[in-house]
Amino acid sequence: MNKIQTSINLRLIILGGMVLAFVIPLMMISSLIEERSISRDTAAGEIGDKWGKSQVIVGPILQVPYNIRIPKSGSANNKDKWDYVTEYAYFLPEDINYNATLKTELRKRSIYETPLYSGQIKISGKFRSINVNDFPSETTYIYFEDAKVILSLSDMKGIGGEIKYNMGGKNKNLLPGTKSIFFSTGLHSPIDLSEQKAESEFNLSFDLNGSNSLYFAPIGKTSKIVMNADWRDPSFTGSFLPKDRNINEDGFTAFWETSYYNRSYPQNLTSMDETMAQLILSSASGVDLILPVDYYHKIQRATKYGLLILVTSFALFFLMEIFGGVILHPIQYILIGSAMVLFYILNLSLSEHLGFMIAYIIASLAVTILIGYYSANVLNDKKKGLLTGGYYVLLYIFLYVILASEDQALLLGSFALFIVLALIMHFTRKIDWYKFGNQTN
């Protein structure tokens, strides 16, 4: 007999080396999953480019230009020398109500699916009257007659049909572009505020297409959002969670209500910058239309347990060597490990066509049958082949439970490891490891 057969220490070192070597294909599979996930996101982006991307709606907002004087450069001590510049003040509505009713569908491109929606958006609220006291003390002139109403929208491709807009009881037109460098895409409407003496109510409605998500910015002193859709798997995200929500087989209804005390920007802005604009955009709340099963995420999580599964499997075969008197060759361990690694590739490729659960069942059964058949032959014992098959059935069932119970995965995994270790210690408690190699010899 050669030294591999007689030296338990050498065999353990070889097994450890093989386990570490399998880290490389596991990392390659993880990279493949990431690549396929990116391909899925690219396909979803291509659909969104033509239908409408994720939408973030901000507005309407009043924009009023004004002139302000500032000391000329180098003449801070001489107040007779001034420069006059034009600034823009932004006034947010006192109250704003968003209402969205969405109809959703799954649109397929190649083998990838992405959720799309279409529906009607209604926005109502009121602006308070604007007066000279709302501007800095160095203001020299206010262009009330050149004011604008701005509606910021992420993707203009999503707008469809007629846009109905009423301000102060008068029907008005919204024109493409915001005329603001801080809100790059959207609509605007010229408005003359020179004769405005009281609050102005507004109403706005339009059809909107989009994909994946819809958000609204709570820019009013009091902001309310009502959203209805026939999507059964919403994820409510953003700066605020819904005050009330209802999810059932027909879809979901959600309601948000926030105060301007809950955010970090004021109601009136005498000057705007990129930081303030980003604060307004980032305060939006809404919904993500998530797919019920993100199989890329689940398979990626499964690969993280790959090394642990290899260790426990090799431990099983090593114990069978000890109690069965048949010594496996390192190549046989490599073949068994390769079959286990192939499980992840099978699961990935089948999930893209059949869904995660069916793919998982097929891949796990295929690997279980293959390893069980191989074990029965190399160990010269059909009972051990059945035992091995049973072990892998339990192993893959347990892995599925862990993947399905993401919040409890650590707890379940730690208990399982403890039980496996306890069993190994129990069955090997009477083995004299110092004499094991000599007995074999």
Image (cartoon, rainbow, N blue to C red):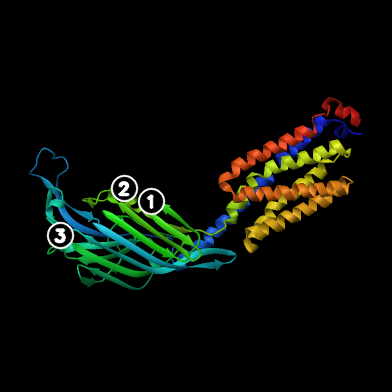
**Residue at 78% over, 44% down:** 334
CA separation, marks 3 and 1?
36 Å
- Of the pair 414 and 369, the residue shown nearer to us: 414
Q: Which residue lies under the disc numbered 2?
A: 262
**Which of the two marks, 2 or 3, is nearer to us in this view?**
2
Secondary structure of the residue carrying tag 3 is loop
Q: Which residue lies under the disc numbered 3?
A: 143
Q: Is residue 303 left or right of residue 285?
A: right
Q: Residue furthest left?
A: 80
What is the crowding at mark 3: few (fewer than 14 residues within 10 Å), some, or many (at least 20)? some
Q: Which amino acid, by three-letter code, is at mark 2?
A: Asn
Q: Which residue lies under the disc numbered 1?
A: 240
Q: Which amino acid, by three-letter code, is at mark 1?
A: Phe
- Of the pair 323 and 106, the residue shown nearer to us: 323
Residue 23 rendering spot, x and y as whole percentages: 68, 42
Q: Is residue 230 left or right of residue 257?
A: right
